[in-house]
Image (cartoon, grey):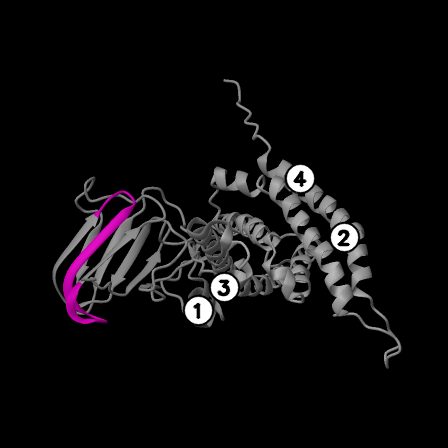
Amino acid sequence: MVIPSPFVYWAQTESAITLKIDLKNVVDPNLKVLEDNIKFTAQGIGAHGQSQYEFTLNLYSAIKSNAANDEVPFMRVFDNRVELALQKEKPAWWPRLTAQPQKPAWLKINFDLWKSEDLQDSDEETRDVMRDYPGMYDKLHKEEMGYRKEDWKKVYLILYNLFQMIGFTYVLSVISIRYSKLGYDSVTDTYEHVGSAIKFLHLMQILEILHPLFGYVKGSVFMTFVQVMGRNFIIFAMIEGEPRIQTKPVIFYLYIVWSSVEVIRYPFYITNMYKKEIYLLTWLRYSIWLPLYPLGVLCESVIIVRNIPYFEETQRFTVSLPNEWNFAFHLPSFLKVYVFMVAVPGLYFLMSHMQKQRTVKLKPKVIIKKSK
């Protein structure tokens, strides 16, 4: 059974914290105070009606506990509320009440008692916040004085990376399970079982071109564009455009290479957004590309070379003169140029870009110890 929390309204001075607990007809209140933590329980009438209520707060900094002084903190019980007064261990203005930056939904600001650091020397006993400081009320409600609500941009990026991680894990799992059961016989129909998932996941990756463009992440728009559109060209023009290539073993190997890279890359991005570094994951992110990127480009090149005679035969995507646009395009000739003038130099620039990132991310940290 989940015990509800009452609404708690807080305010501060340089030396104290006051809490107003919105409960009526309180019975058996119990307050436990540690150095930086308080826990309150009581029976009363609150937002959930007559019930048992409790809350715990991990405070931003230390306070004087009741173990040190029976008078600190003190609690007063009224018919319609409970008031607590907590003395700070060290006088200072706190940017927020709790240690964590995320604010509980039931914690509010007590505007009747609110003072800011700028007003600490004021001789006036009471101030009308809305009259004297227009806009402050809305600002405090929005920012909650030091709290930050989860950034929608961050939430979107986490959900996007999580979705992609699950998607590529699914692809890799299906390929692995089928191969463990059927052996090499599973290779030829790899496209049939995971081709749709690969197409959808790579269409979603087009959003990654927009992420640095709109400032969601830091990175090179050009390099991201080259990687994403290069893969989509292989998927939708080379594989989707020629059914005969879909049953070749190279599709099996290409999907394994792509998925192996992505099941490491997306978890790495998620941990980065939470500023949590897992060294093994970081090392894999900036090392696994060393064998897999060349293998991926090799598979893509094999697909293109195998497709040249097919497209010579079908003339698919080829535009011949005369036509109303007065424009000609011969796909097989383009593919020959693409392999030698785009794919090979593209791999060099991509590997150089990744090597620079690897050098920065995996370089040993130098710790300088000061001599005593």
Q: Magenta residues?
A: 33-52
- Mark 3 or mark 4, which is nearer the start of the sequence? 3
State the separation of the CA atoms marked 4 and 3.
32 Å
Where does the image place residue 225, in percent across and percent down from the top left? 69, 58
Q: Which mark is residue 137?
A: 1
Three-letter residue code for mark 1:
Tyr
- Residue at image position (61%, 56%) is 248
Q: Is mark 1 on a helix, strand or loop?
A: helix
Three-letter residue code for mark 2:
Val
- Mark 4 or mark 1, which is nearer the start of the sequence? 1
Mark 4, residue position: 355
In the image, which is nearer the foreground, mark 1 or mark 4?
A: 4
Q: Do the residues labelled 3 and 1 touch (CB within 8 Å)?
A: no
Q: Are marks 4 and 3 in contact (CB under 8 Å)?
A: no
Q: Is the magenta stretch mostly helix, strand or loop?
A: strand
Where does the image place residue 94, in percent across and percent down from the top left? 40, 50
Q: What element carries label 4?
A: helix
Mark 3, residue position: 152
State the separation of the CA atoms marked 2 and 4.
23 Å
Q: Is mark 3 on a helix, strand or loop?
A: helix
Three-letter residue code for mark 3:
Trp
- Residue at image position (63%, 66%) is 243
State the separation of the CA atoms marked 2 and 3.
41 Å
Three-letter residue code for mark 4:
Gln
In the image, which is nearer the foreground, mark 3 or mark 1?
A: 3
Q: Is mark 2 on a helix, strand or loop?
A: helix
Mark 2, residue position: 339
